[in-house]
Image (cartoon, rainbow, N blue to C red):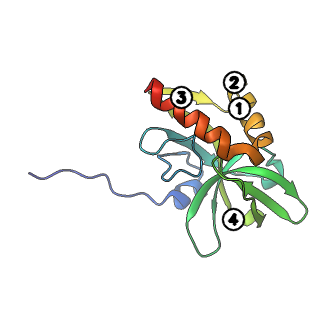
Amino acid sequence: MVHNQVPKQDIEQLLRHGHSVRIFPKGYSMYPMFVPDRDEAVIRPITDTTRLRRADVVLYRREESILVLHRIWKVTADGIYLVGDRQTQIEGPLHPGQMRGILTSFVRKGREISVCHPAYIFYSRLWLILRPFRHHVGKIVHFFVRKII
């Protein structure tokens, strides 16, 4: 049996040409925000890196490495500092030229949720405040998620 496969798209090329993309984030660095193979991220191109703010989720390329989706910890004259939602270690400073796209919404259980939704804004701000305690909070969240699902 032959299966038709959709050709892999070059995410960076699509973003460079002004297209939004939908991706399934891999790995657990953004857990509990994104669960691999369940949640989709809707990313639009970044047109102006001066508009990036704390708590924005951006898609960036590590130097000579992979594309990563993480949350902005802070933006300074030195660069952009990022942290995954499951991490406590801050990465940076990164150059604004490494930024490829910004999260505009996410899809969970078939429902698209905007980053402008008040519940999302509350979550993203709270999660940054809880950064030093994430390991403990993550264990609690994981315990309850396992019980519900």
Between the C-alphas of marks 4 and 3, the distance is 36 Å
Of the image marks 1 and 4, the number of the one nearer the N terminus = 4
**Residue 137's spot in the image, x, y percent?**
66, 38
Residue depicted at x 69% and y 65%: 98
Between the C-alphas of marks 4 and 2, the distance is 29 Å
Q: Nearer the viewer, mark 3 or mark 2?
A: 3
Q: Which mark is residue 144?
A: 3
Of the image marks 4 and 2, the number of the one nearer the N terminus = 4
- As drawn, 118 above or below 21: above
Of the image marks 3 and 2, the number of the one nearer the N terminus = 2
- As drawn, 39 above or below 29: above
| Labelled pair 1, 2 in contact (Cβ < 8 Å) | yes
Category of crowding for the residue at label 1, using alpha-carbon neighbours closer than 10 angstroms: few (below 14), some (14–19), many (at least 20):
few
Instruction: Name the outermost residue toward the left.
Output: 1
At label 3, which amino acid type do we have?
Phe
Residue indicated by mark 1? 123
Of the image marks 4 and 3, the number of the one nearer the N terminus = 4
Instruction: Name the outermost residue toward the right.
Output: 77
At label 1, which amino acid type do we have?
Tyr
Q: Label 3: state its secondary structure.
A: helix
Category of crowding for the residue at label 4, using alpha-carbon neighbours closer than 10 angstroms: few (below 14), some (14–19), many (at least 20):
some
Residue indicated by mark 4? 98
Q: Nearer the viewer, mark 4 or mark 2?
A: 2
Of the image marks 3 and 1, the number of the one nearer the N terminus = 1
Q: Nearer the viewer, mark 3 or mark 1?
A: 3
Residue indicated by mark 2? 119
